[in-house]
Image: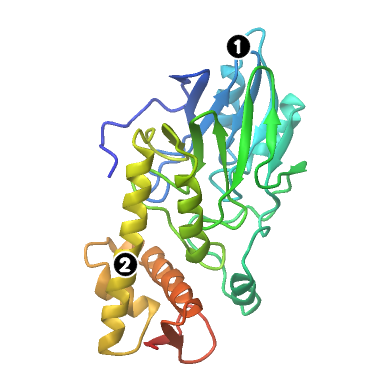
């Protein structure tokens, strides 16, 4: 877990080296930790990564961080959750910069998650920016070149279907896919655990030196953190299968049995995480639903 010493001043730019600055948005919560990290990259022509929530105060803080001789040329969004993308439109209007992302909010959803959405399963947890529409849809591996910097976009679905990470050399802006203070929420139909695990292994191949996450401090041991995330998820999977060996159960029932130390306010998110595991296990033939897939369906061991 992230040490509690991570507590930067809201709205104050902090230099992180390699012409990267971080500005903390004023939206702390159990889901966002201290708040959303907005990053400024570059010396003159700047890229802004994850403008953050719809906050006039945070918009002013970003604009105030643009120093004489600097201007914002690109706005990059890791994913369309309400704590990351809504301010992109206002920032674009103020600066004339274009917005880059994988696509709109529902882009990148897997087939099984599209099915769940058609059956009425709504997103949970952080809230979806359904109005988000980038000016440029990025493909996996695309390069975004600016004034003395180049960012490479990596499509990393899992936490969210349109999630992207952006690599600046061996520094990677990981959005909500990898953070140091908590594991990433995977909440169907926006999140897909099968995709999440594949994206973790994809990030392992980048051999990054540091991750700059959407919330919390830099992750200075990316390989170790990815190993922990994969081990953590496989451990949850084992606990779910052990519980189902005793009797069929739904995601909320399993969450209450497995997440014994989780505060009540976070139990709905825990249940969504369990549902993500159950859908993944179903896709691999290890469990089967007793009825159509939904958030309350009971599952049994195959």
Q: Residue 264: image x %, image y %?
A: 30, 64
Indicate which disc residue 236 carries: 2
In the visual, does 152 lie left or right of 280? right
| For the residues bearing labels 2 and 1, Cβ distance under 8 angstroms | no
Q: Secondary structure at mark 2?
A: helix
Tell me the quadrant of the picture where the N terminus can be found: top left
Q: Residue 133: image x %, image y %?
A: 73, 48
Residue 119 visible somewhere in the drawing: yes
Q: Residue 52: image x %, image y %?
A: 56, 38
**Furthest-left residue in this view:** 261
Q: Secondary structure at mark 1?
A: loop
Q: Earlier in the sequence, mark 2 or mark 1?
A: 1
Front-lying residue, 191 or 238: 238
Q: Residue 279: image x %, image y %?
A: 48, 75
Residue 180 visible somewhere in the drawing: no
Q: Which residue is mark 1?
A: 67
In the visual, does 185 lie left or right of 66? left
Tell me the quarter of the picture where residue 216 sits. top left
Residue occupying the point 59% across, 74% down: 112
Front-lying residue, 93 or 214: 214
Residue occupying the point 41% across, 41% down: 28
Residue occupying the point 28% across, 86% down: 245
Residue 292 lies, with reference to residue 230, above or below; the image says: below
């Amino acid at each position: 877990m992230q040490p509690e010493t991570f507590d930067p001043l809201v709205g104050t730019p902090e230099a992180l080296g390699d012409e990267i600055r971080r500005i903390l948005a004023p939206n702390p919560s159990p889901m966002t930790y201290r708040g959303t990290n907005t990053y400024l990259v570059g010396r003159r022509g700047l890229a802004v990564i994850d403008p953050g929530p719809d906050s006039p105060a945070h918009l002013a803080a970003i604009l105030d961080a643009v120093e004489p001789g600097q201007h914002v040329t690109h706005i990059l969004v890791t994913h369309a959750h309400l704590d990351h993308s809504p301010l992109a439109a206002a920032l674009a209007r103020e600066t004339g910069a274009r917005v880059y992302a994988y696509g709109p909010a529902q882009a990148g959803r897997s087939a099984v998650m599209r099915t769940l959405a058609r059956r009425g399963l709504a997103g949970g947890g952080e809230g979806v920016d359904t109005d988000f529409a980038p000016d440029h849809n990025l493909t996996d591996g695309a390069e975004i070149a600016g004034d003395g910097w180049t960012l490479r976009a990596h499509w990393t679905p899992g936490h969210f279907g349109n999630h992207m990470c952006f690599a600046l050399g061996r520094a990677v802006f990981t959005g909500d896919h990898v953070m140091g203070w908590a594991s990433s929420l995977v909440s169907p139909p926006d999140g897909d655990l099968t995709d999440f695990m594949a994206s973790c292994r994809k990030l392992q191949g980048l051999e990054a030196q540091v991750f700059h996450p959407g919330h919390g401090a830099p992750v200075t041991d990316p390989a170790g953190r990815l190993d922990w995330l994969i081990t953590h998820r496989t451990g949850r999977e084992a606990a779910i299968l052990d519980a189902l060996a005793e009797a069929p159960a739904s995601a909320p029932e399993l969450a209450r049995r497995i997440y014994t130390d989780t505060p009540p306010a976070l139990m709905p998110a825990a249940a969504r995480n369990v549902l993500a595991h159950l859908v993944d296990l179903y896709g691999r033939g290890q469990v089967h639903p007793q009825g159509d897939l939904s958030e309350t369906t009971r599952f049994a061991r195959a």
